[in-house]
Amino acid sequence: MEILTWTYILVGLSFALYIGIAIWTRAGSTKEFYVAGGGVSPLANGMATAADWMSAASFISMAGLISFAGYDGSVYLMGWTGGYVLLALLLAPYLRKFGKFTVPDFVGDRYYSNKARVVAVICALFISFTYVAGQMRGVGIVFSRYLEVPIEWGVVIGMCIVFFYAVLGGMKGITYTQVAQYCVLIFAYMVPAIFISMQLTGNPIPQLGLGGNLEEGVPLLEKLDGVLADLGFKEYTAGRKSMGDIFMITLALMVGTAGLPHVIVRFFTVPKVKDARLSAGYALVFIAILYTTAPAIAAFGIYNAIQSTSEKEISELPVWVQNWQKTNLISIQDKNNDGKVQYVADPAVNELTIDKDIMVLASPEIAELPNWVVGLVAAGAMAAALSTAAGLLLVISTSVSRDLVKTFKPEISEKKELRIARLAAAGAVILAGYFGVNPPGFVAEVVAFAFGLAAASFFPVIILGIFSTRTNKAGAITGMIAGLVFTIAYISYFKFIAPELNNSEHWWWGISPEGIGSVGMLINFACCYFVSKFTPPPPAEVQELIQEIRIPRGAGQAVDH
């Protein structure tokens, strides 16, 4: 069968499964809509958290970034993985014991202030919309290639699917849909990786294949270093960024991970505090399967892509190049009219441009794997993008219905609150679609900005909210505003206002926009500390509450929602 037929079958079957689960698990109360009723098992929550966490950036874009950035791409692996460990150990159990629906809910109660709650809602909306833009872009890319529709229409189709199961099922529907999506995405990621590892190195385990030898007996990475050096690029295993920038990007991704509202809220869906810890452990194992495979896919993909295109006759290029040219994500310009493709580092001479976001999706075609594998990867990519998009939409709708409307109109009925949550989710889907059509960068770059905003806004107030009895509402509000405004201003200046200055010569202290969230976080911490020091301490009952959630005694019990 053709690739298109396999894609229709596999993507169609997976969509039917998601919609069926959404109907079966339809939310009937606000508690089911916000936290799936609070009765999800740790194993199911671990799988759902892994799917929620591994977005289009992880599935589609991360290996592509590593392919072209080489050693520098490791910041995404280190930052995201380290951040998850930080979240699981430092935050998840305490937040679950606190027993609130959302991060703004925690901020509002811990800092005994509706102003702090509203500022946290604004932060959550900024983070979620930035993040969801990357997901919808990923959906558009997948549909444009595999269903052969324009990217804009691909985004619209993705919007309709997410709208259906996120709005209908709320967190309950999303949780069980994400369990199915994890199974689809991990199977789709591993199958081509195993096939290609066998082809190149004879080893079926991709993680071992990365360090293995090619057929001629030369180590894969050594061969790749030599190929790239011959074309004028830096060696694959050599770094290009400064160590300072590498450190700041990794730190921003780590602490940003620990402040992501759509991941944190997943730990509110289990019955007990110890279940939150257990589900974090399960999720880490499920995430590690994909994250340890990504460097192998990156190296396999760039090696195969160069071998099949560089110095080849344009008229004899493989089919995968023609397929992706239709989406405008690969372009060839024969600058010297010799009829061959020159892929070199010098932009004045280079004739081949490959979008970073297609490397994972195109790798089965590049390796000439069976058509059903290509269709399977499409279904996996859709699962990754839609699972995270749904989680983010739920954060947006909950922030509006519960943290804004319910706070200022506490007499509102549960039925009306549920209706407002669904309307907010619908509005968020439309806005997310707009950002998906008009993204400010590559999928992983857009997502990296979301992590920077989370690092600069939520991480300090959550950490201090748990471990400092002295931090008060004035410090928290000042810190969140200062961190968020600084980070948005820095990113906006270099990305949108003066993109021609976006290089290490003009960055402050040599820190790129992707890493500036670390500085925003430090500003947030400093504001929290100094403003709290010179303003009245929190009330005695709040300080007692903080002491209570930190002690291990009674850790099996969580405050009910």
Image (cartoon, grey):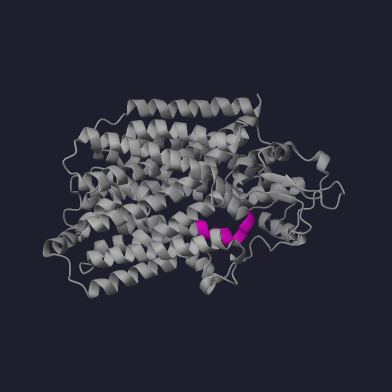
Q: Is residue 348 visible?
A: yes
Horizontal relation, residue 112 to residue 144: left or right:
left
Q: Is residue 209 visible?
A: no
- Placement of 42 over or under 465, stated as above or below: above
Q: Locate residue 509, reporting x and y percent.
A: 52, 74
Quadrant housing the N terminus: top right
Q: In x, y percent, where is residue 453?
A: 42, 58
Q: Is residue 9 above or below residue 416?
A: above
Residue drawn at 40 percent across, 49 percent down = 128
For image coordinates 54% across by 46% down, the residue present is 438
In the picture as drawn, the residue positioned furthest to the front comes out as 497
Q: Is residue 72 magenta?
A: yes
Magenta region includes residue 476: no
Q: Which residues are magenta?
A: 68-76
Depth check: 17 or 445 in front? 445
Instruction: Please identify the residue farthest to the left as the structure is shown.
Output: 540
The spot of residue 475 in percent (x, y) is 27, 67
- Tally the marks: 0
Q: Tell me the residue at 68%/52% (across/down).
A: 213
